[in-house]
Image (cartoon, rainbow, N blue to C red):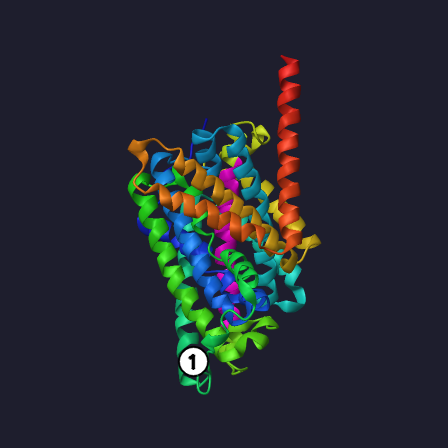
Amino acid sequence: MTTLERHLGTGRAIIVGLAAMVGAGVFYVWAPASAAAGTGLLIGLVLAGVVASLNALSSAQLAMAYPVSGGAYAFGRATLGPWWGFSAGWLFLAGKTASAGAIALIAGSYLWPEQARAVAVAAVVVLGAVNMAGIRSTAGVSAAIVFTVLGGLLVVFAAIGVGGSLSGAHLDLARLTDAGWYGILQSAGLLFFSFAGYARMATLGEEVRDPRRTLPRAIITALSITLVIYAVIGVLCVTILGPVALASSTSPLADVLGGQEPWTGLARAVAGIACLGSLIGILAGLSRTGLAMARERDLPGPLSLISERTHAPVVAEAAVGIAAIAGILLLDPARLVGFSACAVLVYYAIAHLSALRQRPADRWLPRAIQHVGVAGCLLLAVTLPLPGVLAAAVWLAVGLLARFVRLALAARAR
């Protein structure tokens, strides 16, 4: 069997993670979060950051012990058993495929609003082809996107300062809890949608050099940089626009600039490019999880095929792209974010449980990290908008039932 090759060092792994995290969330999720919690979204951002940090730590501990493709699917199988692993992988595939469709549509709406769906489909096709060319191609394109986005954000921040957008702006800290704690928790779950890029790094375990050293450093460094960027943008959006205007904004960062050209045009361009960075990372992570599940016969066997020329899971990449395109053509991003966040939060809860079951020799975190992480993930998951929670529950039930039927038929055939 052809195997994946270890091409990524720490720097490139950090870039892949940054490209995945500094993406659509920076430019989209502030509006629904503000609608849920008003100024309290700043508390939600802190809560989302704490949960994401706990998840990153457990993911790093697991990736050091199990440096293989598949992320929590592989971790769950190794420590909790195949049913737990399947549940994690099944939820990850659904949640992140929904994310891919949503992010592609957001990119299209920024880059060419009149042809948003066509742009979204083209983005999935092009970035899927890049991933099929191998992990070096993925890392190279991610690097170009990350540096473009970070440079663009610096220019936007400078424009906000020079243009006087902050003059007269006021942050009313006395109203942080006006929406109530349920609304704040819901905003935290929605904001978590933006932080899940480190999952993609954990799924690339077979393609990094010295994974026991590289993955923990890359995951923690990329998340730390992302937390700083999100904190700055969140405070700017709430302070300058106010919670009411922010809740109805379709392009918060551009609105912060008050319609000043060419800065709003730059903000839209940066937003679209950032979404493409998220998309390429999501597609890469999805294909590796599909590869791992196919190897264990939890998905059709052909998905485990790896190109001898590029050493990429080309069949899984193609299947993921087709599923994402179906979501683009049939759904809209607002309906996908809650479902995606719920599915991925439960995925990370399983990762924490997996970390709890690791051998003492493989552990370097106190168990309290995992206990608080499980509780945090499940709390944020159940407080998300009800349609997304119900959709995730139904999807998991369908997957478990299908696996039970398949195993029963296979046992009868023996």
The residue positioned 62% from the left and 22% from the top of the image is: 407
Q: Which of these two is toward me, 357 or 339?
A: 357
The reply to whether residue 363 is in sight is yes
Please state if 72 lies on the left or on the right of 210 as rendered.
right
Instruction: Specify the amino acid type for callout 1.
Output: Ala
Total of numbered circles in the picture? 1
The residue positioned 34% from the left and 31% from the top of the image is: 359
Residue 356, percent across and down?
Answer: 40, 37
- Extent of the magenta region: 267-290
Q: Mark 1 points at which residue?
A: 159
- Location of the C terminus by quadrant is top right
Q: Is residue 315 above or below residue 131?
A: above
Q: Which of these two is toward me, 221 or 13?
A: 221
The reply to whether residue 305 is in sight is no
Q: Residue furthest right?
A: 330
Magenta run includes residue 128:
no
Q: Which of these two is toward me, 126 or 60?
A: 60
Magenta residues, dominant SS class: helix
The image quarter containing residue 160 is bottom left
The residue positioned 43% from the left and 53% from the top of the image is: 52
Magenta run includes residue 289:
yes
Q: Which of these two is toward me, 212 or 283?
A: 212
Residue 63, percent across and down?
Answer: 37, 39
Please state if 117 lies on the left or on the right of 60 as rendered.
right
